[in-house]
Image: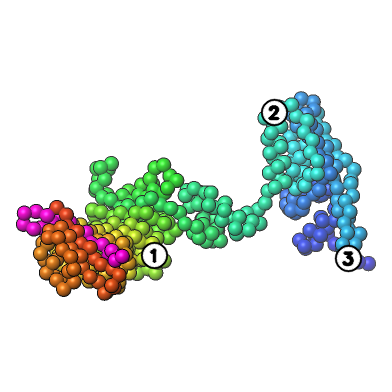
Amino acid sequence: MPKNVNWNDLSDQLKHKCVGKMNFVTRVMLRSTSRNERKLVDRHKNRFEFVRIEEINGFPIGGVTVIPSSEKSENPNQKSIIKEQAIHLECENLNYHRFTLLPFLNFALKTGKIGRLALDISDEGLFQEVAKAVFRTENSKNWNDFSVELKLKIIEEMDFKTRSFFRQTARSNKNLVDSLPIFIDYIQFTGSSQKNSKQCTEFSFKIDNLRQPKTFRFTKKSEFRRKILPIFLYVLKIGIIDLFFCHYVPDLIDELVGMFYGWEIQKFKIRHLDFVVSRRAMFWFARNSDEKVLEHFETAADPFIDFPIDNLLTFPSVHNARKIEIHESYKIEILYAIIEKWIEIDASTGSTVIIYKPGNYYEISCRFEDRVIYEIPNEKILLTTNNPKKQIEIQIKHQDNFDYFDSVTCQIVEIF
Protein backbone atom coordinates (compact mmCIF):
# COMPACT_ATOMS: atom_id res chain seq x y z
CA MET A 1 0.00 0.00 0.00
CA PRO A 2 1.24 3.54 -0.74
CA LYS A 3 2.43 5.47 2.23
CA ASN A 4 -0.01 8.08 3.57
CA VAL A 5 1.29 11.61 2.96
CA ASN A 6 0.33 14.47 5.24
CA TRP A 7 -0.28 17.94 3.74
CA ASN A 8 2.49 19.38 5.90
CA ASP A 9 4.92 16.86 4.41
CA LEU A 10 4.49 18.29 0.93
CA SER A 11 7.00 20.70 -0.48
CA ASP A 12 6.01 24.34 -0.99
CA GLN A 13 6.25 23.88 -4.73
CA LEU A 14 3.80 20.97 -4.66
CA LYS A 15 1.46 22.85 -2.32
CA HIS A 16 1.34 25.74 -4.78
CA LYS A 17 0.46 23.37 -7.58
CA CYS A 18 -2.36 21.93 -5.46
CA VAL A 19 -3.73 25.38 -4.60
CA GLY A 20 -3.58 26.31 -8.27
CA LYS A 21 -5.99 23.42 -9.03
CA MET A 22 -8.46 24.36 -6.27
CA ASN A 23 -11.64 26.31 -6.90
CA PHE A 24 -12.39 29.50 -5.01
CA VAL A 25 -14.49 27.90 -2.26
CA THR A 26 -11.81 25.31 -1.47
CA ARG A 27 -9.19 28.04 -1.29
CA VAL A 28 -11.35 30.00 1.18
CA MET A 29 -11.70 26.94 3.37
CA LEU A 30 -7.99 26.11 3.20
CA ARG A 31 -6.82 29.61 4.14
CA SER A 32 -8.97 29.50 7.29
CA THR A 33 -7.00 26.53 8.70
CA SER A 34 -3.75 28.30 9.65
CA ARG A 35 -1.70 31.40 9.11
CA ASN A 36 0.77 29.57 6.85
CA GLU A 37 -2.01 28.31 4.60
CA ARG A 38 -3.50 31.80 4.44
CA LYS A 39 -0.18 33.18 3.20
CA LEU A 40 0.07 30.32 0.72
CA VAL A 41 -3.42 30.85 -0.70
CA ASP A 42 -3.10 34.64 -0.83
CA ARG A 43 -0.22 34.32 -3.30
CA HIS A 44 -2.64 32.95 -5.90
CA LYS A 45 -4.92 35.14 -7.99
CA ASN A 46 -8.65 34.51 -8.33
CA ARG A 47 -11.00 35.44 -11.15
CA PHE A 48 -14.54 36.72 -10.60
CA GLU A 49 -17.18 37.00 -13.26
CA PHE A 50 -19.24 39.28 -11.03
CA VAL A 51 -18.96 40.94 -7.59
CA ARG A 52 -21.78 42.77 -5.84
CA ILE A 53 -21.48 44.73 -2.58
CA GLU A 54 -24.71 45.99 -1.06
CA GLU A 55 -26.20 47.67 1.99
CA ILE A 56 -28.30 45.19 4.04
CA ASN A 57 -29.81 45.15 7.55
CA GLY A 58 -28.39 48.55 8.46
CA PHE A 59 -24.83 47.60 7.57
CA PRO A 60 -23.33 49.82 4.81
CA ILE A 61 -21.46 46.71 3.64
CA GLY A 62 -23.94 44.06 4.70
CA GLY A 63 -24.01 41.68 1.76
CA VAL A 64 -21.43 40.36 -0.68
CA THR A 65 -22.13 38.24 -3.72
CA VAL A 66 -19.35 36.80 -5.88
CA ILE A 67 -19.47 34.57 -8.94
CA PRO A 68 -16.04 32.96 -9.29
CA SER A 69 -14.71 31.72 -12.59
CA SER A 70 -11.78 29.45 -13.29
CA GLU A 71 -9.65 28.65 -16.30
CA LYS A 72 -9.80 25.12 -17.66
CA SER A 73 -7.13 24.08 -20.14
CA GLU A 74 -8.27 21.43 -22.57
CA ASN A 75 -5.02 21.65 -24.53
CA PRO A 76 -1.88 23.82 -24.23
CA ASN A 77 -3.11 26.34 -26.80
CA GLN A 78 -6.73 26.83 -25.67
CA LYS A 79 -8.27 27.98 -22.42
CA SER A 80 -11.94 28.22 -21.49
CA ILE A 81 -13.53 30.12 -18.62
CA ILE A 82 -15.80 28.01 -16.40
CA LYS A 83 -18.30 29.81 -14.17
CA GLU A 84 -18.71 28.45 -10.67
CA GLN A 85 -21.73 28.66 -8.38
CA ALA A 86 -22.44 32.09 -6.87
CA ILE A 87 -21.44 32.71 -3.25
CA HIS A 88 -23.57 35.04 -1.16
CA LEU A 89 -22.77 36.28 2.35
CA GLU A 90 -25.25 38.36 4.30
CA CYS A 91 -24.72 39.47 7.87
CA GLU A 92 -27.35 39.81 10.57
CA ASN A 93 -25.14 40.70 13.53
CA LEU A 94 -21.95 42.59 14.26
CA ASN A 95 -19.77 39.53 14.95
CA TYR A 96 -20.57 37.94 11.60
CA HIS A 97 -19.95 41.28 9.88
CA ARG A 98 -16.61 41.78 11.59
CA PHE A 99 -15.14 38.26 11.60
CA THR A 100 -16.63 36.65 8.50
CA LEU A 101 -17.96 39.04 5.87
CA LEU A 102 -15.26 41.74 5.93
CA PRO A 103 -12.33 39.26 5.93
CA PHE A 104 -13.96 37.41 3.03
CA LEU A 105 -14.44 40.67 1.11
CA ASN A 106 -10.87 41.78 1.78
CA PHE A 107 -9.56 38.46 0.52
CA ALA A 108 -11.66 38.68 -2.64
CA LEU A 109 -10.57 42.25 -3.39
CA LYS A 110 -6.93 41.52 -2.56
CA THR A 111 -6.52 38.47 -4.77
CA GLY A 112 -9.30 38.83 -7.32
CA LYS A 113 -9.52 40.05 -10.88
CA ILE A 114 -13.08 41.31 -11.24
CA GLY A 115 -15.02 41.20 -14.48
CA ARG A 116 -18.09 43.24 -13.39
CA LEU A 117 -18.61 45.20 -10.17
CA ALA A 118 -21.91 46.41 -8.70
CA LEU A 119 -22.05 48.70 -5.66
CA ASP A 120 -25.38 49.26 -3.92
CA ILE A 121 -24.26 51.64 -1.17
CA SER A 122 -26.18 54.81 -0.29
CA ASP A 123 -23.31 56.54 1.55
CA GLU A 124 -21.46 58.48 -1.15
CA GLY A 125 -18.20 58.67 0.79
CA LEU A 126 -18.14 54.94 1.46
CA PHE A 127 -19.11 54.27 -2.14
CA GLN A 128 -16.06 56.20 -3.34
CA GLU A 129 -13.75 54.46 -0.86
CA VAL A 130 -14.88 50.98 -1.90
CA ALA A 131 -14.49 51.87 -5.58
CA LYS A 132 -10.97 53.18 -4.95
CA ALA A 133 -10.08 50.04 -3.00
CA VAL A 134 -11.18 47.85 -5.91
CA PHE A 135 -9.28 50.01 -8.38
CA ARG A 136 -6.08 49.87 -6.29
CA THR A 137 -6.39 46.11 -5.99
CA GLU A 138 -6.94 45.63 -9.69
CA ASN A 139 -3.94 47.76 -10.64
CA SER A 140 -1.53 47.23 -7.78
CA LYS A 141 1.93 45.85 -8.44
CA ASN A 142 4.96 45.16 -6.36
CA TRP A 143 7.80 47.68 -6.68
CA ASN A 144 10.09 44.93 -7.93
CA ASP A 145 7.68 44.26 -10.82
CA PHE A 146 8.24 47.74 -12.26
CA SER A 147 10.72 48.34 -15.05
CA VAL A 148 13.84 50.40 -14.32
CA GLU A 149 12.52 53.21 -16.52
CA LEU A 150 9.26 53.40 -14.54
CA LYS A 151 11.12 53.27 -11.22
CA LEU A 152 13.31 56.20 -12.29
CA LYS A 153 10.25 58.23 -13.31
CA ILE A 154 8.67 57.60 -9.90
CA ILE A 155 11.88 58.58 -8.09
CA GLU A 156 12.06 61.79 -10.13
CA GLU A 157 8.74 62.84 -8.58
CA MET A 158 10.02 62.27 -5.02
CA ASP A 159 11.21 65.21 -2.93
CA PHE A 160 14.64 65.19 -1.31
CA LYS A 161 13.42 63.85 2.05
CA THR A 162 11.55 60.95 0.43
CA ARG A 163 14.58 60.06 -1.70
CA SER A 164 16.81 60.11 1.38
CA PHE A 165 14.57 57.62 3.20
CA PHE A 166 13.91 55.49 0.13
CA ARG A 167 17.59 54.97 -0.70
CA GLN A 168 18.02 53.33 2.72
CA THR A 169 15.56 50.51 1.93
CA ALA A 170 17.81 48.42 -0.34
CA ARG A 171 21.10 48.63 -2.20
CA SER A 172 19.35 48.46 -5.58
CA ASN A 173 17.09 51.37 -4.59
CA LYS A 174 20.12 53.31 -3.34
CA ASN A 175 21.81 52.88 -6.72
CA LEU A 176 18.64 54.00 -8.52
CA VAL A 177 18.23 57.11 -6.36
CA ASP A 178 21.89 58.04 -6.65
CA SER A 179 21.77 57.74 -10.45
CA LEU A 180 19.40 60.72 -10.66
CA PRO A 181 20.80 64.20 -9.96
CA ILE A 182 19.19 66.80 -7.72
CA PHE A 183 19.55 70.50 -8.50
CA ILE A 184 20.86 72.33 -5.44
CA ASP A 185 20.79 76.11 -5.18
CA TYR A 186 23.68 76.26 -2.74
CA ILE A 187 25.72 74.46 -0.11
CA GLN A 188 27.49 76.56 2.47
CA PHE A 189 29.61 76.38 5.59
CA THR A 190 29.54 79.47 7.80
CA GLY A 191 30.78 80.21 11.29
CA SER A 192 29.75 82.27 14.33
CA SER A 193 26.11 82.38 13.32
CA GLN A 194 24.06 85.33 14.49
CA LYS A 195 21.26 82.85 15.19
CA ASN A 196 23.40 81.06 17.74
CA SER A 197 25.52 82.82 20.36
CA LYS A 198 27.90 79.87 20.69
CA GLN A 199 30.95 79.52 18.46
CA CYS A 200 29.80 76.94 15.97
CA THR A 201 29.88 75.97 12.35
CA GLU A 202 26.73 75.83 10.26
CA PHE A 203 26.24 73.52 7.33
CA SER A 204 23.24 74.36 5.18
CA PHE A 205 21.95 73.63 1.71
CA LYS A 206 18.90 74.57 -0.32
CA ILE A 207 17.33 72.46 -3.04
CA ASP A 208 15.38 74.20 -5.78
CA ASN A 209 12.02 72.70 -4.75
CA LEU A 210 12.43 73.41 -1.01
CA ARG A 211 11.00 76.61 0.42
CA GLN A 212 13.47 76.74 3.30
CA PRO A 213 17.12 75.64 3.43
CA LYS A 214 18.18 72.72 5.58
CA THR A 215 20.55 73.91 8.32
CA PHE A 216 22.69 71.84 10.71
CA ARG A 217 24.91 73.28 13.47
CA PHE A 218 27.89 71.58 15.06
CA THR A 219 30.77 72.52 17.34
CA LYS A 220 32.78 69.31 17.49
CA LYS A 221 34.39 67.00 14.98
CA SER A 222 32.39 64.06 16.33
CA GLU A 223 29.13 65.93 15.66
CA PHE A 224 30.17 66.50 12.07
CA ARG A 225 31.03 62.84 11.56
CA ARG A 226 27.72 61.67 13.07
CA LYS A 227 25.22 64.25 11.81
CA ILE A 228 26.69 66.09 8.84
CA LEU A 229 29.15 63.90 6.95
CA PRO A 230 26.66 61.32 5.53
CA ILE A 231 24.25 63.90 4.10
CA PHE A 232 27.13 66.19 3.05
CA LEU A 233 28.75 63.45 0.95
CA TYR A 234 25.34 62.44 -0.40
CA VAL A 235 24.46 65.90 -1.73
CA LEU A 236 27.98 66.26 -3.14
CA LYS A 237 27.62 62.91 -4.87
CA ILE A 238 24.23 63.37 -6.52
CA GLY A 239 23.85 67.17 -6.61
CA ILE A 240 24.30 69.62 -9.46
CA ILE A 241 25.28 72.53 -7.23
CA ASP A 242 24.93 76.13 -8.35
CA LEU A 243 27.07 77.49 -5.50
CA PHE A 244 29.38 75.94 -2.93
CA PHE A 245 30.21 78.67 -0.40
CA CYS A 246 32.69 78.36 2.46
CA HIS A 247 33.84 81.60 4.17
CA TYR A 248 35.25 82.49 7.55
CA VAL A 249 34.54 79.30 9.43
CA PRO A 250 36.69 78.08 12.33
CA ASP A 251 39.85 76.03 11.78
CA LEU A 252 37.71 72.96 12.37
CA ILE A 253 36.85 72.87 8.66
CA ASP A 254 40.44 71.93 7.78
CA GLU A 255 40.27 68.95 10.14
CA LEU A 256 36.90 67.95 8.72
CA VAL A 257 38.17 67.87 5.16
CA GLY A 258 41.11 65.82 6.40
CA MET A 259 38.67 63.07 7.40
CA PHE A 260 38.07 62.21 3.75
CA TYR A 261 41.09 63.89 2.13
CA GLY A 262 42.55 60.60 0.86
CA TRP A 263 39.27 59.13 -0.35
CA GLU A 264 38.69 58.40 -4.03
CA ILE A 265 35.51 60.30 -4.80
CA GLN A 266 33.77 60.95 -8.08
CA LYS A 267 34.04 64.48 -9.42
CA PHE A 268 31.65 67.00 -7.86
CA LYS A 269 29.26 68.85 -10.16
CA ILE A 270 29.78 72.37 -8.77
CA ARG A 271 29.13 75.38 -11.00
CA HIS A 272 30.41 78.11 -8.67
CA LEU A 273 33.06 77.28 -6.05
CA ASP A 274 33.57 80.13 -3.56
CA PHE A 275 36.14 78.92 -1.04
CA VAL A 276 38.26 81.08 1.24
CA VAL A 277 38.76 79.37 4.55
CA SER A 278 41.58 76.84 4.08
CA ARG A 279 44.29 76.19 1.48
CA ARG A 280 44.18 72.43 2.00
CA ALA A 281 40.38 72.25 1.78
CA MET A 282 40.33 74.61 -1.22
CA PHE A 283 42.81 72.42 -3.11
CA TRP A 284 40.79 69.31 -2.27
CA PHE A 285 37.58 70.78 -3.69
CA ALA A 286 39.36 72.22 -6.72
CA ARG A 287 40.92 68.84 -7.48
CA ASN A 288 37.62 66.97 -7.07
CA SER A 289 35.40 69.40 -9.00
CA ASP A 290 34.33 68.37 -12.49
CA GLU A 291 36.10 70.68 -14.95
CA LYS A 292 33.23 70.27 -17.42
CA VAL A 293 30.79 71.70 -14.88
CA LEU A 294 32.79 74.26 -12.86
CA GLU A 295 32.22 77.67 -14.46
CA HIS A 296 33.18 80.08 -11.70
CA PHE A 297 36.05 79.75 -9.21
CA GLU A 298 36.30 82.35 -6.45
CA THR A 299 38.68 82.73 -3.53
CA ALA A 300 40.77 85.30 -1.62
CA ALA A 301 44.48 85.70 -1.08
CA ASP A 302 46.09 86.40 2.29
CA PRO A 303 48.19 89.61 2.08
CA PHE A 304 50.65 88.19 4.62
CA ILE A 305 51.14 84.73 3.08
CA ASP A 306 52.25 83.86 -0.46
CA PHE A 307 49.23 82.74 -2.44
CA PRO A 308 49.92 79.36 -4.16
CA ILE A 309 48.60 80.41 -7.55
CA ASP A 310 51.00 78.14 -9.46
CA ASN A 311 49.76 75.07 -7.57
CA LEU A 312 46.15 76.13 -7.98
CA LEU A 313 46.50 76.52 -11.75
CA THR A 314 47.62 72.89 -12.09
CA PHE A 315 43.97 71.85 -11.62
CA PRO A 316 42.06 71.79 -14.95
CA SER A 317 38.87 72.74 -13.11
CA VAL A 318 40.50 76.07 -12.20
CA HIS A 319 42.45 77.09 -15.29
CA ASN A 320 39.57 75.99 -17.57
CA ALA A 321 36.90 77.82 -15.55
CA ARG A 322 34.93 80.43 -17.44
CA LYS A 323 35.44 82.91 -14.63
CA ILE A 324 38.07 83.28 -11.89
CA GLU A 325 37.81 85.84 -9.08
CA ILE A 326 40.52 86.43 -6.48
CA HIS A 327 39.87 88.98 -3.74
CA GLU A 328 42.42 90.87 -1.66
CA SER A 329 45.34 89.68 -3.77
CA TYR A 330 47.75 92.61 -3.24
CA LYS A 331 50.21 90.81 -5.51
CA ILE A 332 50.36 91.47 -9.23
CA GLU A 333 52.15 88.13 -9.74
CA ILE A 334 48.80 86.35 -9.35
CA LEU A 335 47.51 88.11 -12.44
CA TYR A 336 50.72 87.38 -14.36
CA ALA A 337 50.45 83.65 -13.62
CA ILE A 338 46.85 83.42 -14.88
CA ILE A 339 47.55 85.34 -18.09
CA GLU A 340 50.61 83.18 -18.83
CA LYS A 341 48.58 80.03 -18.16
CA TRP A 342 45.90 81.23 -20.54
CA ILE A 343 48.47 81.78 -23.27
CA GLU A 344 49.99 78.34 -22.62
CA ILE A 345 46.70 76.38 -22.84
CA ASP A 346 45.00 78.61 -25.45
CA ALA A 347 42.08 79.39 -23.14
CA SER A 348 38.63 79.50 -24.69
CA THR A 349 37.00 82.72 -25.82
CA GLY A 350 35.04 84.43 -23.05
CA SER A 351 37.28 83.20 -20.20
CA THR A 352 37.41 85.93 -17.59
CA VAL A 353 39.51 86.69 -14.53
CA ILE A 354 38.89 89.46 -11.98
CA ILE A 355 41.66 90.31 -9.52
CA TYR A 356 40.94 92.74 -6.67
CA LYS A 357 43.64 95.07 -5.35
CA PRO A 358 46.37 93.59 -7.55
CA GLY A 359 48.88 96.41 -7.97
CA ASN A 360 50.04 99.12 -10.33
CA TYR A 361 49.04 99.73 -13.95
CA TYR A 362 52.59 100.24 -15.19
CA GLU A 363 53.68 96.87 -13.78
CA ILE A 364 51.26 95.11 -16.14
CA SER A 365 52.32 97.16 -19.12
CA CYS A 366 55.99 96.45 -18.49
CA ARG A 367 55.59 92.73 -17.82
CA PHE A 368 53.84 92.08 -21.16
CA GLU A 369 55.58 94.81 -23.13
CA ASP A 370 56.31 92.51 -26.08
CA ARG A 371 52.64 91.50 -26.34
CA VAL A 372 50.99 94.95 -26.04
CA ILE A 373 49.23 95.85 -29.30
CA TYR A 374 46.89 98.55 -28.03
CA GLU A 375 46.83 100.66 -24.92
CA ILE A 376 44.75 103.40 -23.34
CA PRO A 377 46.79 104.52 -20.32
CA ASN A 378 45.19 103.69 -16.99
CA GLU A 379 42.13 102.17 -18.69
CA LYS A 380 42.69 99.38 -21.17
CA ILE A 381 45.37 97.09 -22.64
CA LEU A 382 45.17 94.55 -25.47
CA LEU A 383 47.67 91.67 -25.52
CA THR A 384 48.42 89.16 -28.27
CA THR A 385 48.27 85.40 -27.62
CA ASN A 386 49.83 82.47 -29.44
CA ASN A 387 46.53 82.07 -31.27
CA PRO A 388 46.20 84.71 -34.03
CA LYS A 389 42.41 84.67 -33.63
CA LYS A 390 42.42 85.57 -29.92
CA GLN A 391 43.52 88.49 -27.77
CA ILE A 392 43.54 89.27 -24.06
CA GLU A 393 41.70 92.42 -23.08
CA ILE A 394 42.67 94.00 -19.75
CA GLN A 395 40.40 96.62 -18.21
CA ILE A 396 41.34 98.64 -15.14
CA LYS A 397 38.79 100.02 -12.70
CA HIS A 398 38.91 102.62 -9.92
CA GLN A 399 42.54 103.68 -10.23
CA ASP A 400 43.73 106.00 -7.44
CA ASN A 401 46.18 108.92 -7.53
CA PHE A 402 49.14 106.55 -7.08
CA ASP A 403 48.19 104.46 -10.14
CA TYR A 404 46.95 101.57 -7.98
CA PHE A 405 43.55 100.16 -8.84
CA ASP A 406 40.81 98.36 -6.98
CA SER A 407 40.32 95.67 -9.60
CA VAL A 408 41.42 94.51 -13.01
CA THR A 409 39.37 92.39 -15.41
CA CYS A 410 40.99 90.25 -18.09
CA GLN A 411 39.06 88.45 -20.81
CA ILE A 412 39.87 86.31 -23.84
CA VAL A 413 38.29 88.01 -26.87
CA GLU A 414 38.03 86.82 -30.43
CA ILE A 415 39.41 88.79 -33.37
CA PHE A 416 36.90 89.26 -36.18
Amino acid identity at mark 2:
Glu
Amino acid identity at mark 3:
Lys
- Write down the residue under mark 1: 292
Secondary structure beneath dot 2 equals helix
Residue 248 is labelled as none
- In the rendered image, the quadrant that contains the C terminus is bottom left
28 lies left or right of 413: right
Q: What's the coloring here?
A: rainbow
Which residue in the rendered view is the most extreme toward the top? 58
- Write down the residue under mark 2: 124
Q: Is residue 345 visible?
A: yes
> Where is residue 252 shown, x and y percent of the image?
26, 57
Judge by depth and name the residue closer to the eye, 348 or 335.
348
Which residue in the rendered view is the most extreme toward the front? 416
Secondary structure beneath dot 1 equals loop
Q: Specify which label sits upstream in the sequence, 3 or 2.
A: 3
- Write down the residue under mark 3: 3
Amino acid identity at mark 1:
Lys
Judge by depth and name the residue closer to the eye, 136 or 198.
136
Cα separation, mark 3 vs mark 2, equals 58 Å
Q: Is residue 411 magenta?
A: yes
Q: Is residue 309 visible?
A: no
Judge by depth and name the residue closer to the eye, 343 or 36.
343
Secondary structure beneath dot 3 equals loop
159 lies left or right of 337: right
Write the start and end of the magenta stretch as one range.
399-416
Query: Is the residue marked by circle 2 packed among few (<14), some (14-19), or many (20+) residues within 10 Å?
Result: few
Is 4 located above or below residue 64 in the figure? Answer: below
Q: Residue at x 12, y 55 (%)?
A: 399
